[in-house]
Image (cartoon, helix red, strand yellow):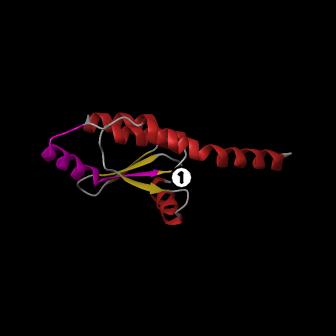
Amino acid sequence: MKSLFKIFFKTLRIVLTPFMLLWEKATTPKGVVRPSQAQQLVDQQCKNLALYQFKTCPFCIKVRRELGCLSLNVSLLDAQNHPQNREALLQGGGQVKVPCLKITDEKGGVQWMYESADIIQYLHKKFA
């Protein structure tokens, strides 16, 4: 019975994945338009951010949509299909849980933020 559930949910994920990604592309609003100098400053600040994510995780999609809305060019790291990213997430943050925003400050200190609502709140405080 347990293996039947595994097969069912794996099949469900395979079927729903293209629709989830298409929905994300189709419904992501246009980003904030900033003057080029302001956008360059934002892009410079975004170099200190990295989002560890799974492509079809609903919470990751939620964060990626906000990145698009705020016109933020944050590095997206796939922790599901790339073992080196998964290992970096585990070593740095202590757990493989996504979405996770890695924030590096000017002094080289690193903060790992795990909850999508907290990540979105942080992005709005810093960039909105």
Q: Which residue is drawn at 36% across and 33% down?
A: 121
Q: Residue at x 26, y 38 (%)?
A: 126
Q: Report the front residue among 48 and 93.
A: 48
Q: Which residue is drawn at 35% across and 41% down?
A: 68
Magenta run includes residue 57: no
Image quadrant of residue 122? top left
Give the answer, above or below, for where 85 lies relative to 34. below
Res. 10 in view: yes
- Horizontally, residue 113 falls left or right of residue 14, namely left
Q: Which amino acid, by three-letter code, is at mark 1?
A: Gln
- Horizontally, residue 126 falls left or right of residue 118, namely left
Give the answer, above or below, for where 126 lies relative to 80. above
| Residue 1 at x, y percent in the picture | 86, 45
Q: In which quarter of the image is the C terminus?
A: top left
Outermost residue on the right side: it is: 1
- Horizontally, residue 98 falls left or right of residue 6, namely left
Q: Give the range drawn in magenta.
A: 33-52
Q: Report the front residue among 126 and 77.
A: 77
SS state under label 1: loop
| Residue 25 at x, y percent in the picture | 45, 42
Q: Report the front residue among 125 and 110.
A: 125
Image mark count: 1
Q: Residue at x 29, y 42 (%)?
A: 71
Instruction: Determine crowd level at label 1: few under 14, some 14-19, many 20+ residues with C-alpha closer than 10 A.
Output: some
| Residue 49 at x, y percent in the picture | 33, 51
Outermost residue on the left side: it is: 37
Residue assigned mark 1: 95
Outermost residue on the bottom side: it is: 84
Magenta run includes residue 49: yes
